[in-house]
Amino acid sequence: MRYAIPCLLLILFLPGVAFTQAVSCLDIYRSFSEIKPEVQPTPMSQGYILTYGSVMEWYTDSRCILLGSSDGLWLYDVDQPDKPLPLARLSGGAINDIAVNPIDSMIAFSVNEQPIVYLLNTDGTKSILQANGQAITGISFSNDGNWIAIASSDIGDIGSKFDARVQIWDLSDKKQIAFMKSDTGAIREMFFTPDNHYLLTDGVLSGYIGDHIEYWDTATASRVWDYNELWTSFGHKSADDPFPLLVLKIAMKGHNIAFGGLYGYMDYDEYYGHAIQSWDAELREPKFEIILSRRGSGEPEVGVSNLTFNSDGSVLVSSSSNGIVQFWKMTDGSEIDKFEIGQHEVDQIALSPNDRFLAILSDGEVRIWDVEKQSEYVVLPT
């Protein structure tokens, strides 16, 4: 099924951007020698909490995309999909996170259950950063490109505490400038505010359903609030009452946060339905709620599979378990548009920096959709 594109979607996403580029990002890295990370054996595999499988990240030119897997790290040009360039090859483990510096296009990546972040510059130089924990679980650059945040955890027995921690490094001199320690098990995602004053972390804990979200002051390395405290301040006091939203997915742009999950949650099989909620992180106030489905309504349950923002944070994009991608206006949560992608088990979605393409990662396969035409642009061979 296809849906008409309102003029508003074109205004928000495609403000006169020219897409044709003569030089491919592949030319920048073609002469580089591949990185071959040494994967050290670890005492115990904890795949249920530390990230495994495939991950992707757009390159800054909006024409290329990075895909990491158990094979290594590959750079694809969406206009030359049959000629991917290997940047790293693995003999064990898998690439578990990728980040691209929005200013100088430095590529950072890590290998599961290893404590090293590999940095690859466009001038051909390479370097590494050593994490405090035994295994890196997340990487994020600041919006100005000056800092990098690295999340890591220790590897322990099932049910043990992993002691997640975050280190922030100044990339100008490769020195650590902040260190935060969390009560969660493994921090999977991190988001800087535009001024770098705060960092949002999204973590998980073995044996628990729902994400553990914390908001940190980067100058003092102290926690400002966590997700439970947000709702307590809005009147949720009793553990006997349904929890407003059990978070399963998260995205952030600027000071806007989007949470997706189960609303009216009491237990894993006792909740009201599926919803998306938006908050202002700085003001600690809810903005709007979008109910995707209600249990007992006679309609199929529709849950959020992933969330992402467009480049300026004015539009939220969600993928759902029914194979529909929807675009939401961040001022009031109204739906701008939607289209069907035909994929129900989506691991990750990401808009290109110029908002032209939507990349959808599902079961190791990446499909690139043209947002304006609402049609599949290319499938990357993997």
Image (tube, rainbow, N blue to C red):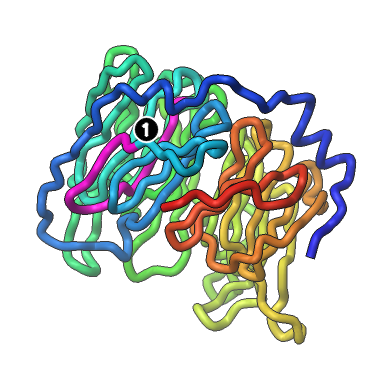
Q: What's the magenta bit mostly, secondary-structure-wise?
A: strand
Residue 39: percent from left, percent from top: 15, 46
Residue 13: percent from left, percent from top: 75, 36
Q: Residue at x 38, y 19 (%)?
A: 122
Q: Residue at x 37, y 49 (%)?
A: 187
Of 372 and 254, which appears nearest the observer? 372
- Left or right of 44 on screen, residue 81: right
Question: Which span is picked out in magenta?
Answer: 86-101
Q: Residue at x 19, y 38 (%)?
A: 36
Of 265 and 191, which appears nearest the observer? 191
- Left or right of 71 on screen, residue 18: right
Count of all numbered marks drawn on residues in the image: 1
* Location of the N terminus (image quadrant): bottom right
For the question of whether residue 215 can be seen, the reply is no
- Left or right of 99 on screen, residue 318: right
Q: Is residue 196 magenta?
A: no
Q: Residues within 10 Å of mark 1 (few under 14, many from 20)?
A: many
Q: Tell me: residue 187, above or below residue 221.
A: below
Residue receiving disc 1 = 149
- Left or right of 169 on screen, residue 316: right
For the question of whether residue 188 can be seen, the reply is yes
